[in-house]
Amino acid sequence: MVKIAPSILSADFANLARSVAMVERAGADYLHIDVMDGHFVPNITIGPLVVRALRPHSKMFFDVHLMIENPDRYLADFVQAGADLICVHAEACTHLHRCVSQIKEMGIKAGVSLNPHTPLEALEYVLPMLDLVLIMTVNPGFGGQKFIPEVVPKIESLSRMIQERGLSVEIEVDGGINKETAGQVARAGAGVLVAGSAIFRADDPAQAMEDIRRAAER
Ligand code: DX5
Ligand code: ZN
């Protein structure tokens, strides 16, 4: 069974608690929180204060996706704010091993994300430490972009790599996921599907979540 992780990037920021409560009631598994700094990606979103403000409103697993340079500087802030998992970009960390170790030492789960062009080799020596790998299926920065199908073989290879090494690392995909694309990423081995616009911009977000789940399980 796949997990569905609605991305609040496409939610109504003026009514964030309400949007979060709605997807929680509808059975969302993770809440995907997109943090952007205007440097690593060309957009600015939210920081630890918003994560902290949402924490008392939800029991969901907070999946925090850091699209920022020097994430090391902010790890403690996000942990204290209530993150359950922090995912950093391999491209943004000169000392990726240290960064992942720091997340684990703070007692939460750790993930590493790869941009569409970044090969799996970047994970080679950190994979056993990880709880999750986030494969970007768009170039990060904005919601509502088109799914990049060239990334599907990377998901398959990662899935094989995890199995061959006997690891239990979740594969998450992010970007352009909807009921049309969910099937192929799930078949390739993705177990956690992030969706922003497909859920929050739908007339019926609960139904949209259900449609993605059903498409993934076909
Ligand atoms: C993109 C973000 C995504 C974004 C996905 O940079 O990391 O999480 O919210 O949005 P959709 O599902 O609309 O592509
Ligand atoms: Zn994301």
Image: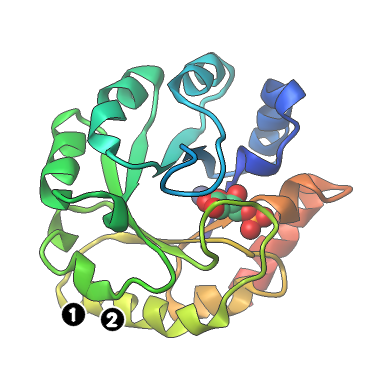
**In the structure shown, which secondary structural element does the residue marked by tag 1 occupy?**
helix
Q: Is residue 3 left or right of residue 8?
A: left
**In the structure shown, which secondary structural element does the residue marked by tag 2 occupy?**
helix
Give the amino acid type for the residue marked by disc 1 in the picture. Answer: Glu
Give the amino acid type for the residue marked by disc 2 in the picture. Answer: Arg
> Which quadrant of the structure image shows residue 218?
bottom right
The numbered dot on residue 164 is 1
Name the residue: 59% across, 18% down. Answer: 57
The residue lying toward the viewer, choosing from 212 and 12, is 12
Name the residue: 30% across, 27% down. Answer: 74
Name the residue: 64% across, 35% down. Answer: 24
Q: Is residue 54 visible?
A: yes
Q: Position of residue 22 (x, y in %)?
A: 73, 33
The residue lying toward the viewer, choosing from 126 and 167, is 126
The alpha-carbon separation of the residues under discs 2 and 1 comes to 6 Å
Q: Are the residues flagged by discs 2 and 1 in contact, CB closer than 8 Å?
A: yes
The numbered dot on residue 160 is 2
Q: Residues within 10 Å of mark 2 (few under 14, many from 20)?
A: some
| Residue 96 to residue 180: above or below | above
